Amino acid sequence: MGDPFGIIGRWLIDLVTGLGMEPGAALTLLRFLGAAILATVLLLACFFLIVAERKLLGRFQDRYGPNRVGPWGVFQTVADFVKLIGKEIVIPDGIDKPVYWLAPLLVVMSVVGIWAVVPFAPGFRGTDLNVGVLYIVSIGAIGTLGIIMAGWSSNNKFALLGAFRAVAQLVSYEIPMVLTLLIPTMLAGSMGVTAIVEAQKDLWFIAAAPLAAAVFLISSVAENGRAPFDLMEGESEIVAGFNIEYGGLAFGMFYVGEFLHAFTVGVLFSTLFLGGWRGPGAEAYPLLGLVYFFAKALAVWFLTIWVRGSFPRVRIDQLLALNWKFLTPLALVIVALTAVVDKMAAEQGWSQLLSLLAANAVLALVMFAVLGAYGRSVRRREEKLRGNAAALQAGSAR
Amino acid sequence: MIPLSWYLILSALLFCVGVFGVLARRNAIGILMGIELMLNAVNINLVAFWRYLTPGMIAGQVFTLIVFAVAASEAAVGLALIISIYRRRSTVVADEINLMKW
Amino acid sequence: MTVLQIVFLVTGLVTLLAGVMVVASPKLVHAALWLIVSLAGVAVLFVLLNANFLAVVQVVVYIGAIAILVIFAVMLTRRVMADSGPTHNPTWWLALVSALVLFGGLLALITQLPAFGATEAALPATDSLADLGTSLVDVNRYLVPFEVASVLLLAALVGAMAVARPAGEDEESGA
């Protein structure tokens, strides 16, 4: 079983050129076809991802998830989709029509576009950009644009406020994400995602850079807008935020984009830090590589759902303070430390893995010490305030 | 293939569109958008010259990166100034910000 | 007409038309969105010129940051959602004439270049991305402009924050 994807690709090209097309045009047509198939499969996969997430959340909350429609409720999202299509699309008055209808498209496009550079198996990927990592960041930036467009075109002050808050969150958390994306780049020597997976032959990058992986996961979850960072659509806060004026299928696109992004976060994390399709026997049997890829992505996706079901929502000021006062300085220090230690280990002949692990451990200890000192000073201030308030109360009661 | 002249003419056209924007717009932010168009035209020019004449020398791309950095800092400071002016004078129309005119 | 030529013509047309809409659109937010289309067109042109790192940086920096900043500034500098007053100067026809004259002058200049009709030179064997990276940190090459650009960005960061601070906070900072 040599290379099933190459075999299928060659068979398709032979089929199309056999029908009378020249090879260049045939290749372009097949590329477009591949992109269309990938996007369709992803959006269809959302049907099952969403219901799986709801059932998992239900189990975390000690209840069954949806279990009426279909065996174990697997067709619940299909039912939701039919309901969304059947809804009357209420178009608010005074909206900016082209911007209003373009916004959900941009948000979904920004998520589906990430899958173009992800390597599913050896030899099976959309395209091999040599700036793949930066491409992922740039496509994410387009999603931010879609959110502003949605908020502004809705002719609704609360939608605009929600969009402002959402964009503040997204733009802020891009920074630790970009900084920690530099770590696999440094360790692999290339920005191409395929090259990063190739470089994880002996060692998954999470072993060499656990802190960077943790910061990347946290900022990716925040970029996605999942709990505990789900201020963008917190129902108790701003009732659906920027997409409050969207109904029916347009809202469905925002919904699908968010859940697909959650799975995409798992895919990206597993590709960059957990070795992608790497596993025992993956080079010989590419289909096995595909299995490993999805297994790792689903494991990380389960982790994000677990976090979603366990933590309460943070406030907007806590959110931004966490990013600017903790994650960004930490990410900067991680990048500088990894660069220095990597080069020193190469020159002095130390083991790269051990020196990086040691540096990470030292940084983690320093980080906990600083956090502990900060926590103690905040607690002291609170005690003082409480003491003052109690003294005031006692004084006024006398 | 695509001769260099096409890129040069395109960037000259884009530059002139930007000049029109700077001269004709009343709103200060509109003027800034014209400036961004001009900077993009310059970038196209730089990269086209790099690609067609000296692809071995990386100076063209480095120059473009520096122009990116300059454009970003100028947009940031310019927009901060405009927002600050709006707070004081409640207007961003360039004609009405004329306290220092004689 | 090769495929690349068609792609270039379409992209160039889209970029120029979007640019014209930027400077002519009566609604400022629409002009900002057309600016994003124009910037995306320039990114595609960079890809055509084999400078794909610059194309991606263009999307991240210009579209992902500068354009969003422009949209925020447009929304924060108005009392109501709509534009008020005329959006173009009454002497806009003069601006059009001067832009056309400028274009004529530029055209006359660039047609005199010896390299005007040049076709693409061959790309070097190694990828330009690694060369770009090393040239920016090499002391003999472009380290100094790189460091000066980073100082400029730091100054812009501090300056923008200082300028955009709300007025009342200066008096309270001493308390």
Image (spheres, coloured by chain):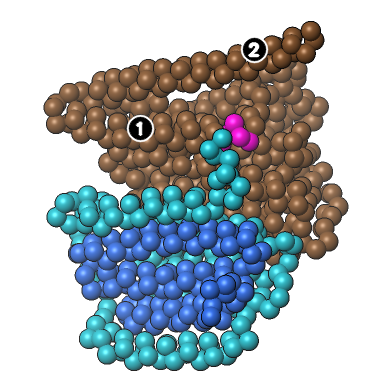
Write down the quadrant of residue A354 in the picture: top left
Which element is circle 2 on? helix
Report in which chain the residue with disc 2 lies: A
Q: Earlier in the sequence, mark 1 or mark 2?
A: 1
Check the rendered structure and report the hue given to chain C: cyan
Q: Position of residue A184 (x, y in %)?
A: 35, 36
Any part of residue A292 in sight: no
Task: Tell which chain the image draws in blue.
Answer: B
Relative placement, left or right, of A295 versus B57 is: right
Q: Residue at x 51, y 35 (%)?
A: A323
Q: Amino acid at mark 2?
A: Gly
How busy is the neighbourhood of tag 2: few (under 14 within 10 Å), some, or many (20 plus)?
few
Q: Nearer the viewer, mark 1 or mark 2?
A: 2
**Above or below, C35 relative to A206:** below
Magenta stretch in the rendered image: A316-320
Q: What residue is drawn where x is 23% and y is 64%?
A: B59
State yes or no: residue C46 in magenta.
no
Colour of chain A as rendered: brown
Q: What residue is at 44 percent from the left and 78 percent from the top?
A: B15
Q: Residues within 10 Å of mark 1 (few under 14, many from 20)?
A: some
Q: Which labelled disc corresponds to residue A387?
A: 2
Q: Quadrant of the N terminus of chain A?
A: top left
Residue C53: x percent and y percent?
35, 56
Q: Amino acid at mark 1?
A: Val
The subunit letter for the residue under badge 1 reads A
Please tell me the numbered disc located at residue A333. 1
